[in-house]
Amino acid sequence: MSPGHQIIGAIQLLLLLLCSLLLPTPSMTSLLKTETDDFIDWWQHAVFYQIYPRSFKDSNGDGIGDLQGIISKLPYLAETGITATWLSPIFQSPMVDFGYDISDFKSIQSEYGSMSDFEELVHTAARLGIKIILDFVPNHSSNQHEWFKKSAARAAGFEDYYVWADGQLDELGVRQPPNNWQSVFYGSAWEWNEQRKQYYLHQFTKEQPDLNFRNPVVVQAMDEVLLFWLNKGVAGFRIDAVNHLFENETLPDEPLSGQSTDPLSYDYTKHIYTKDLPEVLSMVQHWRKLLDDYTAQHPEDSTRIMMTEAYAGLTELMNYYEDSSGIMGSHLPFNFHFITDVNRESDARDFVYNVEKWLIYMPRGHAANWVIGNHDNPRVASRFGSASVDAMNMLLMTLPGVAVTYNGEELGMEDYRDISWKETVDPPARNAGELKFKMVSRDPVRTPFQWSNATNAGFSEAAKTWLPVHPNYLEMNLEAQQQAAKSHYRVYRSLIELRKLPILRRGKFSIEPLSRAVFAFKRTLKDYDTIIVVINVSGKEQLVNLTDFIDRPQQLIVEVAGVDSSYEPGQALSSSALTLAAHEGLVCKLLET
Ligand code: NOJ
């Protein structure tokens, strides 16, 4: 062999050695997968947990939840596997709408605690790996806010902080509101202010005057609110009632909807001049830029995010993500379709359609999100029936994207429908009156969290809590569910555990109705066993043949089964003849045979 050949041989050997070092060994494959996972930002696959602070945990025995109460329960959130919690408003407020009427955007409601309690909350949460998201309520303030008092007095610089208008005289010469706009909470959206001698707009209660976002000074003041809380270390904001931010400036009457005969009801008119105006999108984009700039200037913490609350059409919601010219808006425009578009009457096709429509419309590169409950709507157990709790949580945790849980849904807590008129505090319910309050009251979904079978379900040591505790707390409580061999909470936890698998983070997704009663979906990813989720939404037992759906007969292994299931995790099932009980869901792994 010539010296030249020897050199070439040595180079080849070296190359071979190098290659073998670079080829993925099993441990390296997992390393590579983790690296790929890192391209998913923290919020894109998070479990967000909504806390309703007033009802979560009372630390000082006044019957009202507070910040120290939340701090004491952070370890619970951490062990459950929650990524971030969004808190309904904790700011200074006369509590007409339980915190959604804010009288100082930069201070803490004293019955909830102090600023140093809040700082402790952020730090303790960070130590436990939990991010804190605050509720930003830009559409309105309280009528007790200094801004409103100054605006009513026409103090210099505050004249246009709110939406003011003259009234009109009717044929009898009696003063009437400027137009027919209705409040979401019933009755005219206009209230006369004697001091200013003008009407002001309030899309919610009359104690919640609408801020005027056409005034750049207001925009600036609210930007400062965002920056104030960002500097306290929050990871982002849930933005309240965002699609109500702007109204048509010429104040035209809204057309009748034909859906209600009561002229004082919100449904009486179509809200084409008070909701979803194009200006809303520009404001959302403005806040997105503020957040992105903040993240860029403070890279020591992860991306600060925005989740927006708007009950709006699909197309509008998709524009919140990103408009047609590619300008970024909300990271997560809340997807309320599991609340608004399906119910216990829905069949498998309705569920499939509900999921598909979001994924089809969502612009590429964004994260889907699924909100299964909140403080404004009946709970899962009450909407779909308590037998459906586990199946709904399975859906929430295994669909692609972000999961949003309202506190108590991990236990399957139920609405307390028997709250009397005397005990009722929710403003739209009070407005509806004694005969109709139950139809609209949100109190039943806001009752105290059921921690244990102790007094007041372990929520508070007070003689009386701000809303009554659901009497079912003796059996329905977290402690009981932690101790039981099978419980909704245990199912919820195993789902979060499973959700950590790369296949559920970034696996491909496809969904089909198998019949009117049953639908199934799969998540697939190279090198991972396919995950199959199958759900019977009907009230009858179903015999399911999954063979076509999974292409060929393969073995199914149960990963997560519901509380009442006859199947156990680890059990092998036949894909061609699988019996599902009424409302049963199963999460399975597909074994290559
Ligand atoms: C939406 C909130 O979720 C709700 O609770 C509140 O009453 C209204 N916005 C008004 O702020």
Image (cartoon, rainbow, N blue to C red):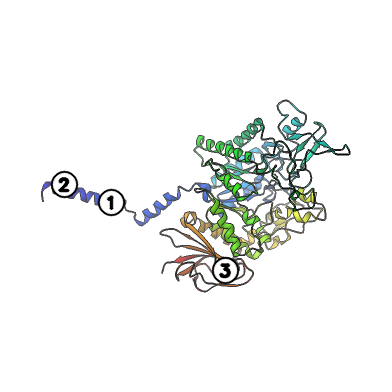
Query: Which residue corresponds to mark 1?
Result: 19
Seen in the picture, residue 371 relative to 152 is either above or below; the reply is: below
Number of other residues with Cα within 10 Å of mark 1, as a class: few under 14, some 14 to 19, many 20 or more? few
Question: Front-most of 283 and 36?
Answer: 283
Toward which corner of the image does residue 245 lie, by quadrant?
A: top right
Q: Position of residue 40 (x, y in %)?
A: 48, 48
Seen in the picture, residue 149 relative to 482 is either above or below; the reply is: above
Left or right placement of residue 228 versus residue 259 in this view = left
Closer to us: mark 3 or mark 1? 3
3 or 2: tag closer to the N-terminus:
2
Q: Position of residue 392 (x, y in %)?
A: 60, 60
Q: Amino acid at mark 3?
A: Ser
Number of other residues with Cα within 10 Å of mark 3, as a class: few under 14, some 14 to 19, many 20 or more? some
2 or 1: tag closer to the N-terminus:
2
Q: CA distance from mark 3 to mark 1?
A: 51 Å
Q: Secondary structure at mark 1?
A: helix
Q: Secondary structure at mark 2?
A: helix
Query: Which residue corresponds to mark 3?
Result: 515
Query: Which residue corresponds to mark 2?
Result: 7
Q: CA distance from mark 2 to mark 1?
A: 18 Å
3 or 1: tag closer to the N-terminus:
1
Q: Secondary structure at mark 3?
A: loop
Q: Position of residue 372 (x, y in %)?
A: 62, 55
